[in-house]
Amino acid sequence: MHPATPPTTDAPAGRAHRTAPPRRRLLRGLLAVTVAAPLMFGAAACGDDGGAADPNAPVKLSIFWWGGDARAKLTEDALALYTKKHPNVTFEKTWQANQGYFDKLATLTAGGNPPDLFQIDDNYLAEYAARNTTLDLTSYQESGKLDTSKFPKSLWQYGVVDGKLAGLAAGENTQGLVYNKTLLTKHNLPEPTTGMSWEEHIAWAEQVTAKTKVPGTQDPSADYKALWVWLRQQGKDLYKGKELGFTAEDVTTWFDLWKGARDRKATPTADVIHEGNSSDVTKQLVVTGKSATSWVWANQMPDLKKNTKDELGVIAYPGDPSAQWARASMYWSVFKGSKNRDVAVDVINFLNNDVEAVKLLGTDRGLPSNLDLRRVVSDDTTDPAMKQSIAVEAELTQTFGESPQVPIKGHSKVKAELIKAAENAQYGRATPAEAAAQFLEACKSAIA
C-alpha cells in the first residue's frame, strides 16, 4: 500500500504568528542568542540559521530508521560511539520493521514532528525532496563537512534530486545474478559469466535445465531491477525527468524475451516463478532448489547463503555491465526544518567515514560507501559469503556507468504493476503486447 504523501514541512503546522510588542521582541531576541541554535563542530553554523555555534551546547537529536533487532543494536552502538566522542550530543532513537515505516514517517511529517535524521530509500527520496522535506546537503558536501571523496561518484550522485543532494547513501549494492555453483559442478556445467548476452544466458539456462532437471534461471520479467538494467542497455531508462523512460513496445520486447525462455523450459513454470517474485530472501528459487539462478541485490549473498548448504556464486546481470551502477541501498536524510541540522549532517558523516563506526555497522545497510573503509571491513570479516560479496562488488565497481536519476513519485506502484503485468503474461492471461500495454497505462496513472 502506498503511504500517505508527506506534505511540505518547513514549519510545524498550525502555529500562529503574531507581532510582539517591541520590548518583548527585544527580550525574545536576547533569549534566542542565549539558548543558541544548531551546533556545528568547530565551525560556523550552516544553512539558514547563520552565526557562530557553541560546540559544547547540549543537543538531543531525534533519529528514525527501519530494520530488525540486529540493525537496531548495531545502530545504537554506533550512536553511542558518537556520543562518547561528542558528550554533549544524545539521541532520541526510534526504529521499527520495514512494514509500515513510511506510513509512520509520513504521519510524523504531516503532524509537524518529523525526526531530525531519518532513513529513506529510493522509493520515496524524490517524493520527500519534491515536498521540501529533505535538507539539501550540497553545501556540506562542497565544504567537506560531509565527505564523499572516498565514495564511488555514481553512489553519492544517486542521492541527487533536481540538482540537490537530498540523501547520502548509507551503503551500496548493485544488481547480482546469484547461481548455484554446487549444482553446476555436480553436472560438469560451466558457470555463467559477466558479459554474457541475454540470449546467451537463456541458452545457458536451457542447457542447465536439460542436464540437471532444475530450471536454469528464474524468470525476471517481473523484476524491475532486471528490466531497468536491460532498458539502460537499450539506450533507454526507467524514468526520464518526470516521465517514464520507456514505451509499451520496449516492455513487449522484454516480455517476449522471457516468453521465449519459458517456451524453451529455461525457466520454471508460472506457479514457481510466482514464488520467486517474492522479495523474501528465504523464498528465492536459488536457495529453495527450484532454479539454478535468482536475480537479487549482490549484498544479499550472505543472507541467501544462510538458507542453503550449496555454494553460491554471483555475477552481474547479462549484457553490458556498465548499465549497472553503484546503488544506494538506503539513505540518511535530514529534515530541512531541523534546528539541529548541522549536528545531523555531522552524524551522517560520522556513520559513513569514522573507521570505528563503519566497522561496528559492517554491511548491515549494504557495503560501506567509503571505499577505503570497505576494504577494512572486508579484511576484518570472517564470513566467506560477505567477503565474496564485497569482492564481487569491488570488481563490478570498475565497470559501473553513470547512475540513473532517483526514481520519481509512484515508483513503488510501478514496481507492483510490473509484477502484475508480467504474471499476466507468465500465466498466459495476456499476450506480451497486451500485458505491456496494461503496464504502461497503470504506470502513467501511478506517476501522475
Image (cartoon, rainbow, N blue to C red):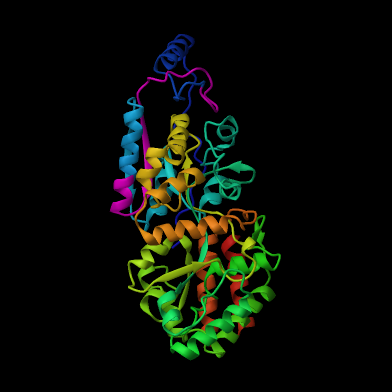
Residue 185: image quadrant is bottom left
Q: Position of residue 27 (x, y in %)?
A: 43, 11
Tell me how many marks there are: 0
Outermost residue, top side: 23
Q: Where is residue 74 in the image (x, y as percent from the top left)?
A: 32, 46
Residue situated in front as seen by the camera: 208 or 91:
208
User: Is residue 66 part of the magenta span, yes or no?
Assistant: yes
User: Is residue 121 part of the magenta span, yes or no?
Assistant: no
- Tell me if residue 357 comes above or below residue 53 in the rendering: below
| Res 326 seen here | yes
Q: Where is residue 170 in the image (x, y as percent from the top left)?
A: 46, 47
Residue 312: image quadrant is bottom left
Q: Is residue 195 left or right of residue 95?
A: right
* Quadrant for the N terminus in the image: bottom left
Q: Which residue is drawn at 40% across and 73% down?
A: 284
- Tell me if residue 446 comes above or below residue 198 in the rendering: above
Q: Position of residue 370 (x, y in %)?
A: 50, 44
* Quadrant for the C terminus in the image: bottom right
Residue situated in front as seen by the camera: 364 or 302:
302
Residue 116: image quadrant is top left
Outermost residue, right side: 235
- Tell me if residue 96 comes above or below residue 78 in the rendering: below
Q: Which residue is drawn at 55% across and 44% down?
A: 151
Residue situated in front as seen by the camera: 380 or 357:
380
Q: Which residue is drawn at 60% across and 33% down?
A: 142
Query: Which residue range is magenta in the image?
Result: 45-74
Residue situated in front as seen by the camera: 19 or 175:
175
